[in-house]
Amino acid sequence: MVISRFCVHLQKNLMIFMSRKFAFVVLLLAMISCGGREKLPRDAWNEDVYNGLISCVDKAPSNSYAVFDFDNTTIIGDISMLLMEYMVENMRFAFEPSESFDAFTSYIPALDLELKGVGRTSRSLALEMSADYTVLRSHIAKGESIEFLRNTEVWKRLKSNLFLLNDGIENTFDYATWCSWAPGLLRGLTYAELTSLTKESVGYWMGEEKLILPKETVDLFDYLRRKGVDIYLCSASLEVIVEAMACDPEFGLGFAPDHVFGVRLEKSEYVEGPLDATYPQTFLEGKVKCINQFMRGEHDGKDPVLIAGDSVGDVPMLTAFPKSVSLVYDCARSGAIADYIRTGACLVQPRYEYTKL
């Protein structure tokens, strides 16, 4: 009987011990799990950049914020250029043939100036493009398939000339000219139609892996938000185009429209017209003005704790706030961005080193 009572007592104590041990293990695992979620995954970040980001966030005061460019910074690829390619690949332009010359030449200041690196004028390219566009639209009216159109010399020439014109404008005129010209290709679309078309384009090019949302971007944005750092996008693409991807839950970036700043046109039902002169357009120094005008006031007048970009258009904002940490995604570009990288004043992450989601 004594032995029996002893065995029962031993069994109870053993069960208590085991249950406490199990609870401790569960707690330990939970702590490890939580700790894992608190950390920024290392993935393809190089060591200096990873450590610099951790240090930046650890030192960030309350009500801090970060500012990211979009094309080739937040994503790999240029959302505007890929939209242009999607539109010509699928003949999704909305303007009529009679409007095509004006659409192809909107806001080009000197149509008869020979374009650098092209050897032709904007006028000669646009006249040829307009004629080809008219022929292609007549084929579409007859019910010809896009596959048929893509096999015609007319379509191939239109596509080639469109990108020649794009490159020539970039090489010959200032950046503001290109930003004014590109929306002309969207003539006839409403903002709602452009949003829908952009989402189509993004989905297609993500499937083709020409537009990539790296795991590092998603993880960094999640990490910043969990640490209380607000995030803004400041892009030289049209604001409505960036919003189409950044604000759609399907793509996982998690932005509200009031945290996305891009190029804006004068208000209209349709995507047309000149740049909005009342707004600091978000390229070059305009990015700095945008930060000062729309972001600082929401954050007690503070500078951003982190600014990220990839191109010459981002250099002004990368260098305007000496106390901010600058992150440059290195796309092997020349010019002012390469000069800035050589100063050693920024964190440098190779753009094409990334982890797939």
Image (spheres, grey):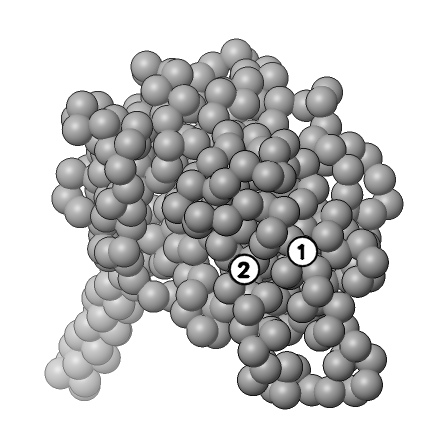
Residue linked to disc 2: 161
User: Is 105 in front, or is 271?
Assistant: 105
Q: Residues within 10 Å of mark 2 (few under 14, many from 20)?
A: some
Q: Report whether residue 189 is seen.
A: no
Instruction: Check disc 1 and give the amino acid type.
Output: Leu
Asked which quadrant contains residue 116, the reply is top left
Task: Report the residue at 63% width, 60% height from top.
Answer: 128
Q: Position of residue 139 (x, y in %)?
A: 75, 81
Give the side of residue 112 with respect to residue 349, left or right. Answer: right
Q: Position of residue 123 (x, y in %)?
A: 63, 47
Q: Report whether residue 102 is seen.
A: yes
Task: Report the residue at 73% width, 33% height from top.
Answer: 274
Q: Does label 1 or label 2 sit earlier along the sequence?
A: 1
Which quadrant of the rendered structure holds the N terminus?
Answer: bottom left
Q: In what element is the residue under mark 1? A: helix
Instruction: Check disc 2 and give the amino acid type.
Output: Asn
Residue linked to disc 1: 127
Against 250, is 283 above or below?
above
Against 87, is 345 above or below?
above
Against 105, is 355 above or below?
below
Task: Report the residue at 80% width, 54% height from top.
Answer: 99
Q: Position of residue 313 (x, y in %)?
A: 43, 32
Q: Residue furthest top?
A: 301
Q: In what element is the residue under mark 2? A: helix
Give the side of residue 72 with respect to residue 59, left or right. Answer: right
User: Is 14 in front, or is 321?
Assistant: 321
Which quadrant of the rendered structure holds the C terminus?
Answer: bottom left
